[in-house]
Amino acid sequence: MSLFNTELFIARRIFFARGTSRKFSESIVAFAVFGIAFGLFVMILSVAIVTGFKNQVRNKVIGFGSHIQLVNFDSNSSYETVPVSKNQPWLNELSKIQGVRTVQSFATKPGIIKTDDEIHGIVLKGIGPDFDWSFFKENLVEGSVFSVSDSLKCDEVLISKQVASLLKLKVGDPLFTYFLNEGTQAQKMRKFRISGIFSTSLEEFDQLFVLADIAQVRKLNDWNSDQISGFEISIRDFSELGPVTQQIRRLTLKYSKDDETVLRPVTITSKYPQIFDWLNLLDMNVWIILGLIILVAGFNMVSGLLILMLERTTMIGVLKAVGTGNWSIRKIFIYISIFLILRGMFWGNLAGIAFCLIQARFGIFKLDPTSYYLNTVPVNLRITHLLLLNVGTIVVTLLMLLVPSWYVTKIEPDKAIRFD
């Protein structure tokens, strides 16, 4: 078998030819290449921005409640929770489950902040020494986080920028809060000091949560020193949320007894379904955009290929006259189309990757955080996304080009040679 590919040789000679006078066909082909480049550029941006937006909003919601919460089976969806013991026999096994990153205790208590001019409803979230501060440190705008220990009760709190602006508070100011316990009419007042101010742009959460020492929440709820609202569990991979939740459920049920409290795992997706359902709807938008763009780019290439074939009608007639088969001639034009597609994909990838890197580094394009929960347009550039987009583009486009290349079979040699 000969290693010389005649069809590829002819295609390369045609594609790299210079000095042609066919300006019209050049314009059509250039427009087809531009269509591929621009289409791939838009697809890269669409996938990078939508996945980046989903990841950032999701991570912010998770930052307030972790991936999974283990709470009393009798607790409802309110922040007045039924306490559980922090000394559970399965805690060591829980932290060893594959995929579990951290386990931390928490407690909540709804209340009111009151100043001379304003009042504002909040949820005081108590945290312990095992709390992971990384999320709030990333979103801290003033002051610092406070330290929590088992031996000394801390009276410092962390509030959001929205609450501080609403109540005209700043770092170091006293914070007067008021609480009621179920079944009693006695009002409890606590004075805290603001140690830091954070801002995540998630208005619903920023205006609600105030972080404090878990010992303060225990005292407000009249709980013992070993009682908490539950455990917050963060995992390494969000895609493993379902399987990890099932493992946690089986673990807690294995140790449960008839006379003891049963804990149930609550995932972040079930706790805030409206947010995650909205984020999942964005996937459908991306698929629609990708489908429309690749179809438009494909039709541009189809028109470009037809123009090339009409332009080379005489050559097709000569090749047929010397005995070249239809499939061999079709392969010549398919090779030319591959060269054109690859050229367009090169420029599309270059523009798309450059935009993503510049936006990720400098955040040039801004967003209104009150509407989009983010300050800048997010990008999530992944090699797997780029590979799938490129492979999908070339495969779908080539499949679309098989139909117009069939036009070669309809060309008759005697008429084609006289074609002008």
Image (cartoon, helix red, strand yellow):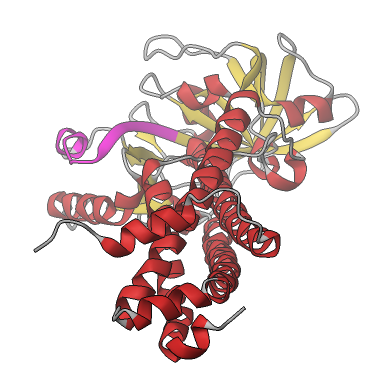
Q: Is residue 35 above or below residue 162?
A: below
Quadrant location of the N terminus in the rendered image:
bottom left
In the displayed image of the protein, which residue is found farthest to the right? 117
Left or right, 90 with reference to 386: left
Q: Position of residue 39 (x, y in %)?
A: 59, 57
Q: Position of residue 216 (x, y in %)?
A: 52, 24
Residue 104 visible in rendering: yes
**Residue at 15 percent of width and 56 percent of height:** 3
Quadrant location of the C terminus in the rendered image:
bottom right
Quadrant of residue 171 in the image?
A: top right
Q: Nearer the viewer, residue 204 or 348?
A: 348
Residue 76 visible in rendering: no
Q: Position of residue 67 (x, y in %)?
A: 40, 44
Q: Nearer the viewer, residue 212 or 338?
A: 338
Quadrant of residue 144 in the image?
A: top right
Q: Position of residue 152 (x, y in %)?
A: 44, 9
Residue 418 shown in magenta = no
Start and end of the magenta stretch? 91-106
**Residue at 64 percent of width and 64 percent of height:** 25
Quadrant of residue 284 in the image?
A: bottom right
Left or right, 180 with reference to 367: left
Left or right, 158 with reference to 260: right
Q: Is residue 400 above or below residue 147?
A: below
Residue 92 shown in magenta = yes
